[in-house]
Amino acid sequence: MKQLFLILGLSLFFTGCYTTQGLANRLTSKPVVLTKTLLTGLYENNIPDDPENSLWNDLCLHHAKKVHDPREGNQVFLDYTDEKEITVELYQNNQLLDSMILSGKPKDNYFVIRKGSHFFTLILITSTVSKKTILGNDANADLLLAQGRSSNTMLLESEVGDEGETITATYMRLGDTRPN
């Protein structure tokens, strides 16, 4: 019986997780070396011709209560001052609207955020949710973002539900300093 639970647990662990390299392979541009100076900067919040998505809301994958309408905020400032966290600020025409702190760690030229993942078992039902975001800069200092979110539910060893979503985007760098 212990072997059954071990096999079940290992299969869930490996099917529901995103790797940094797996997300990086989905990006069209390759990152330059990650440094605090390069990642810290002011970026556009929206991609031209894509009014439905925003950098702020992409980063809110890890803080769902912080989501804003994509039309709110036209700039996002990332401040990478601590080795294990970045501060993110949303601005509309140089006025601060919201901020949040994202915990993570540097790995393979990316800042990796993995928060909000969980594993849940109730008698014969097992559920996993995995959330991961990687941030880096391309040769133009624009922000590269790749995200993965997966949800998997199993009844014993049979898969009941499986959802996965990967998002990739490049956000243009607007400057190096925080808006006034």
Image (tube, rainbow, N blue to C red):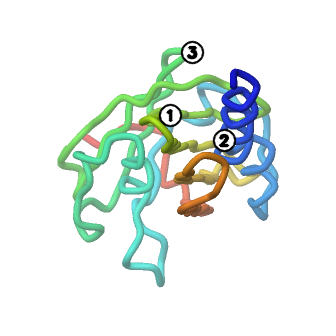
- Residue 141 at what x, y percent from top left? 66, 48
Residue tagged 1: 119
Q: Is residue 17 above or below residue 153?
A: above
Residue tagged 2: 12
In the foreground, 91 or 101: 101
Give the mark nearest the N terminus, 1 or 2: 2
Q: Secondary structure at mark 2?
A: helix
Quadrant hosting residue 35: top right
Q: Is residue 69 above or below residue 3?
A: below
In the foreground, 88 or 142: 88
Total of numbered circles in the picture? Answer: 3
Which part of the image, by quadrant, shows the C terminus? top left
Q: Amino acid at mark 1?
A: Phe
| Residue at x 57%, y 44% (from the top left corner) | 133
Q: Answer few, some or many: residues within 10 Å of disc 1's Cα (few below 14, many 20 plus, some between 14 and 19).
A: some
Give the mark nearest the N terminus, 3 or 2: 2
Q: Residue furthest top?
A: 83
- Residue 29 at what x, y percent from top left? 78, 59
Q: Secondary structure at mark 3?
A: loop
Contact between marks 1 and 2 (CB within 8 A): the answer is yes
Side of 13 relative to 90 (left or right): right
Q: Separation of disc 3 and disc 1 at Cα?
A: 27 Å
Q: Amino acid at mark 2?
A: Leu
| Residue at x 40%, y 41% (from the top left corner) | 62
Residue tagged 3: 83
Numbered disc in front, either 3 or 1: 1
